[in-house]
Amino acid sequence: MTKRTDHPLSSVSRRTVLAGLGAAGVGLIASPALVRAQAETIRIGFPTPLTGPFGAEAKDQVKSAELAVKLVNDKGGIAGRKVELLVRDDKLNAGEAATRTLELIEKDKVHAVVGALSSAVQLAVNEVTRARGVIYVSISQSDTINEVKDFSKYTFHEALNPRMTTAAVARATFKKGSKVALLGADYAYGHEMIRGFKRAAGELGAEIVGEILHPFGAADYSTLMPRIRALKPDILAICNFGRDQANSIKQANDFGMKKQMQIVVPVLLHNQRIAVAPDVFEGIIGGANYYWALESTIPSAKTFNDAYKAAYGSLPTDYGAYGFTGVSALLLAMAKAGGTDTDKVVEALQDLKYDVAKGPQYFRKCDHQSVQSVLVLKSKAKADMKSEQDLFDIVENVPGSEQMLRSCGELGFPT
Amino acid sequence: MTTTDLAAGQGVAPRTLPKAGAALDRWRVPLTIAVLAVLPFVLPSQALAVNVLIYGLFTVGFNLLFGYTGLLSFGHAAFFGTGAYLTGMAIALLGFGWFPAMLTGIVGASLLSVVIGALSIRTRGIYFCMVTLALAQLVYYVALQASGWTGGENGLRGFTVVKADLIGGFSVNLLNPLAKYYFIMFFAALALWFVSRVLNSPFGAAIEAVRENETRARACGFDVERTKLLSFVLSGALCGLAGTLSALHLSIVPLDALGVHTSSIVVMMTMLGGAGSFFGPFVGALVFLLIEDVASLWTTHWQLIVGIVFILFVLFLPKGIWGSLIQIVRRRRAS
């Protein structure tokens, strides 16, 4: 008897327990998933070359991008969802960047990608994101990414492009009949900048008297300086980036070139200027996307500088600011779209008018290039510097206009 | 024909490992494939797993020349990069399907290795390193200058293969990371089987004879130059295959694929895993990529970690991870 009562009891209880366990299990698995689906974090991938020759610029970019994310999260996120920035080191290597972007999309399931700091790397990231329908906001200078071959509806270019910077610098310095010599690094960046200056010279009636290329990463420019001087130019445009810029300008200075000609550069780099003495850069004119002193005329710059100072105790730099404007634009569009639905965010980005750090900006319809102001800066003499951070005079703040860009037809888009 | 007879008679017997080692050796291809098959579930990401496959295969190809034939080339990026570029260009410029494009890449890399091999095997030692390095740099500069075809500095783009059609109406969705992994693993497995066959053949004995003692091999009647050249070309073709797979995987070809860095990491991976061993190359590629991937997530000073690990390996495991493992097992058995 005891057995009989025992048996059904235990069997019933086992079934109940099993059923109960099953129900509880389903509940346990399902309920957090539902909760998670509602408040799923918005993840933004951020590949950037933390190691390598552009490490200083990359670290500034990360700081600014994280600031943009923090400001949004402090206000409660987007549609109640927190935002997270996933920073990855792309090692300034296109293959590595492609792998990292694949990881970000496949494993981390990011909702969008912002970043990169070289023409080749951004094009690699773009190739991976556009095939998978993921939004990519590039924050590195390039003319190529605007062209129809590399474009997709998911591709946005927040940075300036060589065409814009050279046009602004040329307009501020070239005159009708001025003689211009070009010295450029022999790779994509140098070539694109030289092409930009040539086009601008043609439009302004200036004459190109010579074009000299040097290898990427060259340390010695002493053989090139006499050749440049023999061309007797009024203006020398030096088209190289990073360390090359500091090295070539230093040697031009040693040769006393500045006494005979005005030196201009397409992009005057904050970090490179700090890396050498003020008198080396003194009087050099160049373009920039951002300089902190904009705050005297532009309220959003003041807000950005203050937030940056509060967070890091220093001032933002030019390439760093791209991280802020790029991520902010994306987050604004996501807020407008009410979430991360890719098509809606793309539409919101296309219609977006934003002013987050440097005055009004918007993405042009055909190529998604950010139309924005270009600064023309002049490096200050040591005596005129009011503080360590007081590096440049703002010669001109050229307001953004589509006139500065190559036309949609020129880029290969149907008009 | 005397060469092959000699090789069959003398070379094969002493190369096989004793007892349990022999089983490992006999089943080396299925074993490697079995391990590779679980990689995407073990590693942090599937993209990394595909890279391990591709660089593992690249290292296998390099190891054939370095580990088995004893020729240290510093220009193998030329074959990897050429395979990748030709595959991409065949799709982007000529509109080829993925398979003909892969064949173009492999054939192109093989032809290039005939040329570079014929020019470089006349030298030996450090001169061989330098000649291969110089010739590979020539290829690099051709790719840099011919930017209309290769994209130059910006790298080659615009040939993403979304769906690979197979025979009989089947197709593989290459945007699915797991499907892409097994698709690429199929080719890696084929290549591994091929390498295993080559190493077990009389030719496999001949290249090892050349490595051990070139003069003696010549005295035994081997055609040393031809053996070296054939080994060089096989190695180039395998590296070309790795390149074509990398093009399909990343859907871009960076100019760095042809650079000195690519040539040097394959040497490091081989050393790390164990030169002249069958499993070594994959072990080397796996450890190298894994350390780099994981360390660079932790800290921007990942190069420091990678450097220290290398120094430790060189100090304590000079024969590489797999090479040292085999040595320890043998020593234990002997005692």
Image (tube, helix red, strand yellow):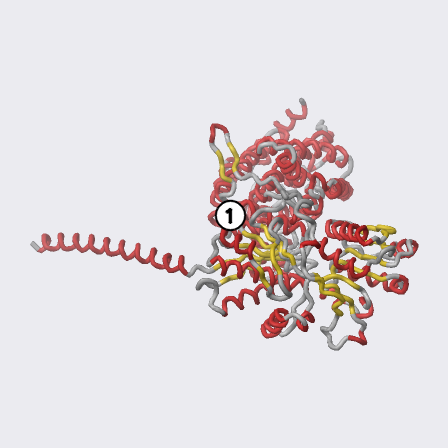
Q: Nearer the viewer, residue A66 or A403?
A: A403
Residue at 48%, 59% in the rendered image:
A42
Vertical comparison of A296 with A266: above or below: below
Residue positioned most to the left: A1
In the image, taking residue A163 as reference, residue B106 lies left or right, namely: left
Location of the N terminus of chain A by quadrant is bottom left
Per the image, label 1 sits on a secondary structure element best described as: helix
Q: Nearer the viewer, residue A26 or A407?
A: A407
Q: Amino acid at mark 1?
A: Gln
Chain containing mark 1: B
For residue B209, what is the image quadrant?
Answer: top right
Q: State the image coordinates of residue A376 (x, y, percent, origin top left).
A: 74, 63
- Would residue B312 be visible to someone looking at this image? no
Q: State the image coordinates of residue A328 (x, y, percent, origin top left).
A: 57, 62
Residue positioned most to the top: B1
- Label 1 packing within 10 angstroms: few (<14), some (14-19), many (20+): many
Residue at 69%, 45% in the rendered image:
A410
Residue ID for mark 1: B46
Q: State the image coordinates of residue A45 (x, y, percent, origin top left).
A: 55, 56
Q: State the image coordinates of residue A371 (x, y, percent, origin top left).
A: 65, 57
- Would residue B146 be visible to someone looking at this image? yes
Vertical comparison of A117 with B253: above or below: below
